[in-house]
Amino acid sequence: MIDDTSASLKVSVVVPAYNSGTHIERLVDSLVRQSMPPTQFEAIFVDDGSTDDTPARLDALAAAHPHFRVLHIDNSGWPSRPRNVGVAHARGEYVVFVDDDDWLGDEALDRMYGIGATHGADVVIGRMTGHGGRGVPRELFRKNRFDATVANAPLIDSLTCHKMFRRAFLDEHELRFPEGWPRRLEDHRMVVRAYLLSKRTCVLSDYTCYHHSRRDDGGNVTADQLDPGEYYAALREALDIVDAHVEPGPLRDRLHRRWLRHQMLDRLRGRRLLEAPQAWVGQVAAEVRDIIRERFGPGVAAGLPPMYRVLAHLAEQDRLADVRRLAEWEQALRAAALVERHALAGTTLTLTVAAWLESDGRPVAAGRTGDRDLLVLPVENVPAELRDVTEALVQGRVDVVARRQGTGDEVFLPVTSTVERVVGPDGTAHAVHRATVTVDYRTVNAGRTAGMWRLKARVTSLARTQDVRLPLLVRCATDGAPPRVVDETAFLTRLRQAVRRRVRAGLRALPALRGRRG
């Protein structure tokens, strides 16, 4: 164990653990690999009354690594108490919360602490990447931000607790995770309060610090196990925190809109609604209806993209049958993208990508009524102002993202964006978004380019953001090495041609073979 009288530690990593099994090994390995010396940080594992071999596994780790500590508590059934116990025992200047099935980048603690100490930050958010279908914030990590607030940055997009907090800041404001009922959204309630109290929040976007995973063994809580009454009681408490710190107006509306969109309306969309039990959907819809009516001013829903505005209207009007019809229609929507050109000159990569939203292979179009483009929907009696996509049709965009295979690192490539409003022969209109990339690939990911990078288009149109795989791979032998572009479309074309040639040659040879057999 590290002696309490030694120099103060820079970072305490707090990990709640319950029946972790082998899922914790990636985290342990990443802690052992940290570039920060082990004398400068500690890892505190709080075993929440595990019933498998987790307690013994953690005790063995602590015996092997002097900077690891293990605390055993009675089962609480939720991460809040283990995290709070970890904070109470932490000795670091900063505290980082990590889940037992996630892991850290090798330089995460060094880099996050460096930014925090340099800028005197109360909160530091490191770039995240998701694995196994786990979603993570995207727009927040478009660039480094050294004085981010809920007003000048999309902090509200990131409400999980997997961040670095100055311990004195946590203690000063008694920032802890809520225990007891309701348990849900405990991180939202703690983190949004931290944002609103923080004197300085920094966002590190040029290094992947946190790897967020989705377990494939049922270890993650699923939507149909969610108790709508408990969940939305917790959401109301998060809204209460915002209301206590932010005056009524555009900023409060924007913050409220985050929960309306992601925790409320997204549960009533597409496959997520259609595959859920009907009784559960009815409970969710009732909670959403009541919160919209009781808590949100008109500016909250008014700031949503068009399809969300329509859905919010249907939910508020208690039109659940129409909500389901909209979900069936929306399930068929897809983003599509096409590489129109690409070239590599030395280390400079250029490409142009066109993208659009389509349904059943045809672009999603809007009908022209007077001077407005109105979305054509499978439900009736929706006010025209809610279906108005005149501006939204040309406000979408397409980004080009490089994702490194293996590590999951994602970076936005610099793009110049344009949009074209295309009118079809039937008079309907749709949008085609284009992005042109020109980048010296040696500078991508701050020069850490070794490996194979998959390029994809991130299409945002009419309230949908969806990734579309592009047929381009960029391979770099080492960091900063000249890239090589692999065009999978050309490769498959050559492969099909080669197969056809072999088949034709085989067919030509058949008569001769038959003759020899005769």
Image: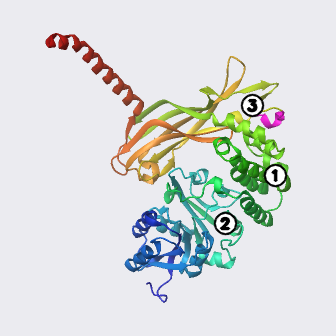
Q: Is residue 395 magenta?
A: no
- Mark in the foreground, 3 or 1: 3
Rendered image quadrant of residue 176: bottom right
Q: Which badge, 2 or 3, is on the more N-terminal residue?
A: 2
The residues colored magenta run 381-390
As drawn, the residue found furthest toward the bottom would be 5
- Up the image or down, 367 lies above or below 190; here it is above
Looking at the rendered structure, the secondary structure element under dot 1 is helix
Count of numbered badges drawn on the protein: 3
- Location of mark 3 (residue): 378
Residue 451 coordinates in the image, percent (x, y): 37, 48
Q: Give how far apart the Cα atoms at labels 3 and 1 are.
A: 23 Å
Q: Name the foreground residue: 469 vs 278.
A: 278
Looking at the rendered structure, the secondary structure element under dot 2 is helix
Hey, what amino acid is under mark 2? Glu
Local packing at callout 3 (Cα closer than 10 Å; few below 14, some 14-19, many 20+) is few
Q: Give how far apart the Cα atoms at labels 2 and 3 are.
A: 38 Å
Hey, what amino acid is under mark 1? Ile
- Location of mark 2 (residue): 186
In this view of the protein, can residue 75 be seen by the observer?
yes
- Location of mark 1 (residue): 292
The quarter in which the C terminus is drawn is top left
Q: Which badge, 3 or 1, is on the more N-terminal residue?
A: 1
